[in-house]
Image (cartoon, helix red, strand yellow):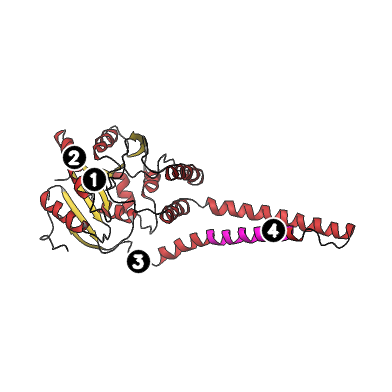
Amino acid sequence: MKPELSVVIPVYNEEAGLAKLFARLYPALDTLAARGVSYEVVFINDGSRDNTPALLADQYRLRPDVTRVVLFNGNYGQHMAILAGFEATRGDIVVTLDADLQNPPEEIGALVDKMREGYDYVGSIRRKRQDSAWRTYASKAMNRFREKITRIKITDQGNMLRAYGRNVIDLINQCSEVNTFVPALAYTFSRKPTEIIVEHEERSAGESKYSIYSLIRLNFDLMTGFSIMPLQWFSMLGMVLSVLSGGLVLLLLIRRFVLGAEAEGLFTLFAIAFFLMGVILFGIGLLGEYVGRIYQQVRGRPRYVVQTILEQSGPDLPEVN
């Protein structure tokens, strides 16, 4: 039977915390089932190198009626895993959840209740973040910066506990973007979005898979994937600097004719030249981000490769090492 709720959980090297996740996730969903909410759980193993695939296979054997497992042949990233999960879902409401238990599974019911009010996209805002101080402040700063550039209003972009309507999921499944940010993509397709406040807990086990570099790359993908405003800003900056540079040249010519040749100000000119070279290099890098996205897209390679899917209606359960 087609479930009303599909829960999509990307998993990467989470063997230390999966037992705790299973112990809280299924009772929370069974509570919803008692209220008449049929459900399925879709795990996506994103090329884990530890014992995660075997643990997911064991959980599938325990609850094959409501559990499905998508196994990638390599690591393609969290958002590609979520997109693969979207393609596998069958529910009218799809909820994404991280496997580290920072988002309590017990909050899924609140998102379902909000979706039943007629919304087709429900984001979530962490009531009290349990991350480090630098990460909290950096995330808030990037949220404000991103909103000005993309006009996408997501209060807490780092929180993946979100609910999507089937109309939004179907539109996302039609997209073929190589680099994307799923919550922002869903926001652009939704007709009636909203947000609710949810609890946030410390990671139950293991460590975050997002390094500083990964977070920077994620924000680059977000800003360059949903707006050309950075290019427009840089074009305007180039025009302003051209005018200022022309004025500086004119000023130096006037000084030469009025005061004669002079050696003063040489280091100032060096500083100005180095500044302009830095601006040029930054501009080349920014342009390279857009060109790189085009290059990755036109190659036409698969965004991810599914090794196998463990599901009740499929073939016999394959052996997972």
Say which of marks 4 and 1 sits in front.
Answer: 4
Magenta part mainly helix, strand or loop?
A: helix
Say which of marks 2 and 4 sits in front.
Answer: 4
Disc 4 target residue: 271
Q: Is 48 situated above or below 145? A: below
Judge from the rendering whether residue 291 lies leftward or rightward of residue 20; answer left or right.
right
Give the amino acid at mark 4.
Ala
Say which of marks 3 and 2 sits in front.
Answer: 2
Q: Is 189 situated above or below 45? A: above
Q: Are marks 4 and 1 in contact (CB under 8 Å)?
A: no
Is any atom of residue 209 visible in this view?
Answer: yes
Assess disc 1: are there few (<14), some (14-19) or many (≥20) residues with their C-alpha within 10 Å of its C-alpha: many
Q: CA distance from mark 4 to mark 1?
A: 55 Å
Disc 3 target residue: 301
Magenta segment: does it hold 178?
Answer: no
For residue 38, what is the image quadrant? top left
Give the amino acid at mark 1.
Val
Is any atom of residue 310 visible in this view?
Answer: no
Identify the secondary structure beneath mark 3: loop
| Whole-percent x, y for residue 243 in the image | 71, 54
Is 200 or 16 nearer to us in this picture?
16
The dot on residue 241 is none
Range drawn in magenta: 268-286
Work out which quarter of the rendered image holds the C terminus and state it. Answer: bottom left
Q: CA distance from mark 1 to mark 2?
A: 9 Å
Q: Are marks 3 and 2 in contact (CB under 8 Å)?
A: no
Q: Are marks 1 and 2 in contact (CB under 8 Å)?
A: yes
Disc 1 target residue: 7
Q: CA distance from mark 3 to mark 2?
A: 37 Å
Disc 2 target residue: 29
Magenta segment: does it hold 275?
Answer: yes
Identify the secondary structure beneath mark 4: helix
